[in-house]
Image: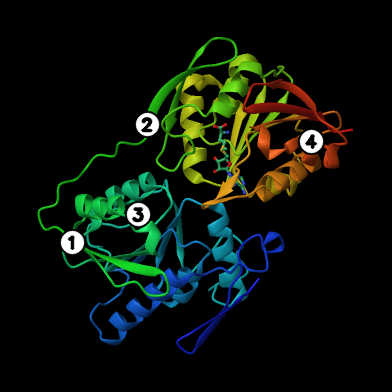
Amino acid sequence: MNTEFLFADRQLSLIRYPQKHQHVSLQAWDSADELIIEYIENLQSESTVAITQNSPLVIYNDDFGTLGCWFSHLKPLWISDSYIATRSLKENLAGNALLDNASDHASFEPVTVLTSVQPLPLNSNQTPSVVVIKVPRALALLAQQLIDLQPYLTPQTRVIAAGKVKSITKSVLALFEKYIGETTTSLAKKKSRLIFSTPRQDKKQHTSPYPTRWECKGTSGVALTLDNLANVFSRQSLDIGARIMLEHMTVSSNDVVVDLGCGNGVLGVNALAIAPDCKVIFVDESYMALESARLNVLNNFPDKIGQCEFVASNCLENLIAREPRPKVTKVLCNPPFHQQNAITDHIAWQMFNDARELLMKSGHLVVVGNRHLDYHIKLKKLFGGAKVLASDKKFVILGTAKR
Ligand code: SAM
């Protein structure tokens, strides 16, 4: 992996977390980061904006912490929906000696880190002077973030977004026009471009369309109500893979279940419907997914919330690292099969490896996937085999036990 970020006579060493699983061709920054840095450095050198504690810099969706590191001396507020992005920021701040207090493991100071489900910690005297947004893949997440920002903006706030030219679509610009104000773009440079949006004086506070809510039938026939925050997988309706899983899932009351890559938590909530005494650990790398899963346990089985845990993690690493480890007997998994626009199976591979590591002896991993993904080959390598528990024309559910 190329880790040396050299820009405007300054050098940072930047990784993508987890470093050991990255392809050599990947790096932690892109040309959109460079455009943002160049633009804000210019604003600073012309003294056009004053970034202070009462008029801070706010950064959204920094992929691997490049912007957080570069601007750390400005003490920015840094917001992300991704545990992996947040871990990358931490590693990169530490790796470049940018942390104020390296001895405190929980602290990111001088950067203030917030998840996408936390409100901005600003009082009525504080207004962001500059807001930087890396345009995310999910437009719903962008819409939610712009709605969240509205109350804190004044016409003097500089709202600057950036992304690859192909990701800056008419729909993206329409969201900025709708929620912020007049919006223009820069010329493209190295396949990226900037968006400039000027907050309206007469702002109307919009209400968010998220979470979206729908119902589906669980294994026992019971109706489950599912809320979905903006960045949740299959936000509008039940995923087809999850549907087959619901039709065929089995769980018993003494199971400790992990819903791995839980999204809105549909599989774990269904486990509670089948076996009301089981314990469920919901795991995802998206904070909106975990918050949706929490809402959905409360929506459907509020008295079971004490049997549930919601853990932000890259695959299962944070459960594996726990002392003592939870005694997990079943892992349910509908793995992610793409990252950005590329089809990839490396996260599924990591998830299966981690499940094998975490499961108790004779514990089960149950996986649903599109047939063409050939998960049975991976499971055979890791577990020595896998049984087809159910299938249809497109999907297959595979079950395997740890020997
Ligand atoms: N379980 C839900 C369902 O069946 O509808 C969601 C499945 S969705 C195909 C995969 C989930 O994995 C997404 O919610 C995504 O955020 C999560 N995910 C992706 N990469 C991850 C990682 N490295 N660690 C943990 N979860 C991850």
Q: Nearer the viewer, mark 4 or mark 3?
A: 4
SS of the residue under disc 4: loop
Residue type (three-letter) at the residue carrying disc 2: Thr
Left or right of 199, for residue 370: right
Q: Eyeballing the image, is 324 above or below 281?
A: below
- The label on residue 212 is 2
Q: Secondary structure at mark 1?
A: loop
Identify the residue under disc 1: 154
Q: Position of residue 123 (x, y in %)?
A: 27, 57
The percent coordinates of residue 28 (x first, y second) are 56, 68
Q: Residue at x 60, y 30 (%)?
A: 308
Judging by the rendered image, the residue that carries numbered circle 4 is: 359
Ligand 1 lies in which image quarter? top right
- Secondary structure of the residue carrying numbered label 2: strand
Dot 4 or dot 1: first in sequence order is 1
Quarter holding the C terminus? top right
Q: Which mark is residue 120?
A: 3
N-terminal of the pair, mark 1 or mark 2, is 1
Amino acid of disc 3: Leu
Q: CA distance from mark 1 to mark 2?
A: 29 Å
* Discs 2/4, front: 2
Is 311 positioned to the left or the right of 397 in the image?
A: left
| Residue 134 seen | no
